[in-house]
Amino acid sequence: MIPSEKQTNRPLSGNRAASQGRATAEAVVTVMAQCLGEKRPADRCLHDYCAKNHQLGSRDRRIISETLFSVLRWWGWLQKLAPEKFVEAWKAGEKELPVHSSDWSGVLAAAWLLENRFELPPAVMFLLRDAGLYPELFQNVAADTPVAGRRRYLRPFFQNKVMPPLTMEELLPAWVPAELAPECQVDYGQLVEWMQRRPPVWIRTQCSDLEYLKRQMEDESGGAVRLLAHPHMPNAFCIRHAGANLRGLSAFQGGAFEVQDLASQAVGFVCAPRPGQQWWDACAGGGGKSLHLAYLMKNRGCVEATDLRAFKLEELKLRARRGHFCNIRMKEWQGKGTPSAYRDRFDGVLVDTACSCGGTWRRTPDGRWNTTPEQLTEFVALQTQLLAAASGAVRPGGTLVYSTCSMFRRENQGVVEAFLDAHPEFVLTPHDAPISGRSSSGMTQVWPWDGDCDAMFTAKMTRRHQ
């Protein structure tokens, strides 16, 4: 297959493609320098950059975003192609990294090829040619080439230099294998292969007439949106959306669905709340899981949603109003001790704690390079504190669920085992894993290959009757 300048939108002229290519390079390198130097999330850095550069149109922003996250996903290899001064400053831990966008054309074009995307937009085709390369160099490549086989795509970019060794292990930080749960240490290559795949978008529907919703979304998007139902998870749909703005659809604005990863949806089914119960989502954040609990409770009973960040609860308030949920109450909680009004009160408590977010590295590849083992130690201390504090709100016979979007044992099984040792009034609760249907003794680690989703850990416990 040969790269093509085919574009669904109006084709760009040669001058416009060159201008967009240079603007893409300047934006991506600037944002990468901020992200990797200042250890800030890439999406926030990109948002700030676009806010300061109003001249960038929607097509410009889309190309910049896709290029940026592709480079970060393949940075383990692409850093060997990147300017030496930038890489040396990054490895030295410097906060200000040198920005010379003219040296990055090859890196940015290579990122698109490593993604197995060979119909290159004109701006990326300009970058390929600016690096002194041509489409003919990439004949006989297949769209289903596994990760290990894509190393050869980079050979032309090194031109007269000897291409350095490129290993699968380099695509994730060197400290990762030692931190994984034992079952994944057996086949680390499988994890790397999945981490290099672009993640799909999952939605959770909140309406009764699913067939009508599907037709409405497909018709309103002009056929750009296609819904594929998960075989085991009710109301979970994988979206093929071809660039459509899902949040602009009337179905979203009317509360008919929420964008939520499949692994995150599984947490609600592990909780298994019943209508009329009292549940506490202790670390609610933006409220995706609070909304799911409320939906499973059929808007009856109560979900108490707390977080230490008031602005996140404001976001939840808007989402609850849009979804027509009247059984969610919100308040701040600093995570230090069980509130006296909550003690022994709830049928169920969900503790979805702050974590390394390693399980989301397909969607947030910058996290691979900005997370350190030392941060895991800090997260474990916080997770231990939050789980112990929230557990005091579970009534005898009630349910306690601990979850993280992490794949690291210290944050997951390690925290739960330490908690159970310190709190013998709680025991693990066997249940079936929602995505795979496999039986669980109480702790479940979801991997990307289980459902083309994030990695997610859940532990379900019951408080004994005294």
Image (spheres, rainbow, N blue to C red):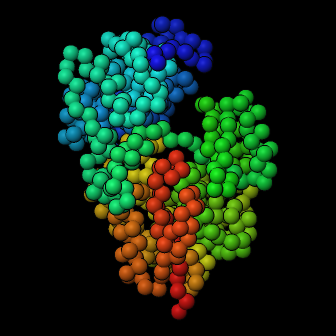
Coordinates of residue 457 in the picture (x, y in percent): 46, 61
Coordinates of residue 344 in the picture (x, y in percent): 56, 83
Residue 143 visible in the snapshot: yes
**Which residue shows up at 34% across the image and 64% down it?**
410
**Which residue shows up at 22% across the image and 32% down it?**
165
Q: Is residue 316 above or below residue 219?
A: below
**Which residue shows up at 36% across the image and 29% down it?**
150
Q: How many marks?
A: 0
Q: Is residue 157 above or below residue 16?
A: below
Q: Is residue 312 above or below residue 155?
A: below
Quarter location, residue 267: bottom right
| Residue at the extreme top | 14
Residue 408 visible in the snapshot: no
**Which residue shows up at 76% across the image and 48% down it?**
210
Coordinates of residue 409 in the picture (x, y in percent): 36, 63
| Residue at the extreme bottom | 466
Q: Is residue 244 above or below residue 258?
A: above
102 vs 315, nearest the viewer? 102
Coordinates of residue 163 in the picture (x, y in percent): 22, 25
In-image side of 25 versus 310 (left or right): left
Quarter location, residue 271: bottom right
146 vs 287, nearest the viewer? 146
